[in-house]
Image (cartoon, grey):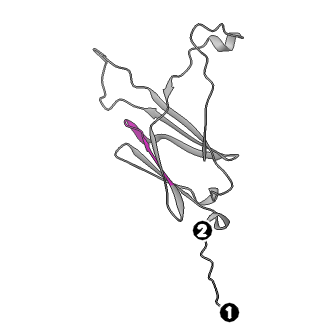
Amino acid sequence: MAERTVPTRSQGEIPKSREDTRSQQRYIAPPVDIYETPAALVVLADLPGVSKEDLDVRVDKNLLTIHGTVSHGVHGDLAYREYELINYFRQFELTNNVDQSRISAELRHGVLTLSLPKAEEAKPKRIEVRVS
């Protein structure tokens, strides 16, 4: 599994078309930990402030995409703000060693846990040695 970077327009760059002048959504890459077990790869992504309804996890053409929209926990009119909540976005390129049909996701206390099961041909197999 390799991370795929997403190109962004750098500050000061002149837009190529009128469409590029619209304000672009800002995002940060959530920090992740990736563990390998005999049966799967496990990805833990920190997504504080993201609810299940505002989380989009998808796989398309071997590309795993995590996109989370942060929502404010307090309802009402904003009186003062010292920091801005920024949305999350990160992509990983998957190999054929991952069984994409069995990927599962769980969001708990701001931590997304993705289980990427290994394909049967990618799992380690013990070869029995016979003595003759």
Of 38 and 29, nearer the camera is: 38
Q: Residue at x 65, y 57 (%)?
A: 97
From the top left corner, tell me how far across and down residue 62 is, in percent. 68, 47
Q: Which numbered marker is on residue 132?
A: 1
From the top left corner, tell me how far across and down residue 13 is, in percent. 63, 9
Crowding at label 1, few (<14), some or many (≥20) Cα neighbours within 10 Å? few
Of 73 and 95, nearer the camera is: 95
What's under tag 2, amino acid-wise? Pro
Query: How many numbered tags mark residues here?
Result: 2
Of 15 and 127, nearer the camera is: 127
Q: Which residue is the site of mark 2?
A: 124
From the top left corner, tell me how far across and down residue 55 is, in percent. 48, 41
Q: Is residue 123 above or below residue 53?
A: below
Q: Residue at x 67, y 9 (%)?
A: 15
From the top left corner, tell me how far across and down residue 125 is, in percent. 61, 72
Crowding at label 2, few (<14), some or many (≥20) Cα neighbours within 10 Å? few
Circles 1 and 2, Cβ within 8 Å, touching? The answer is: no
**Relative to residue 39, is residue 20 drawn left or right?**
right
Q: Is residue 120 magenta?
A: no
Quarter of the view holding residue 122: bottom right
Residue furthest out toward the bottom: 132
Q: Residue at x 64, y 67 (%)?
A: 120
Q: Which residues are magenta?
A: 42-51
What's under tag 1, amino acid-wise? Ser
Q: Quadrant of the C terminus?
A: bottom right
**Relative to residue 5, is residue 109 drawn left or right?**
left
Q: Residue at x 38, y 21 (%)?
A: 84
- Distance from label 1 to label 2 (Cα)? 25 Å
Main secondary structure of the magenta stretch: strand
**Judging from the image, what secondary structure is the residue with disc 1 in?**
loop
From the image, state whether disc 1 or disc 2 is nearer to you. 1
Q: Is residue 132 above or below residue 117?
A: below
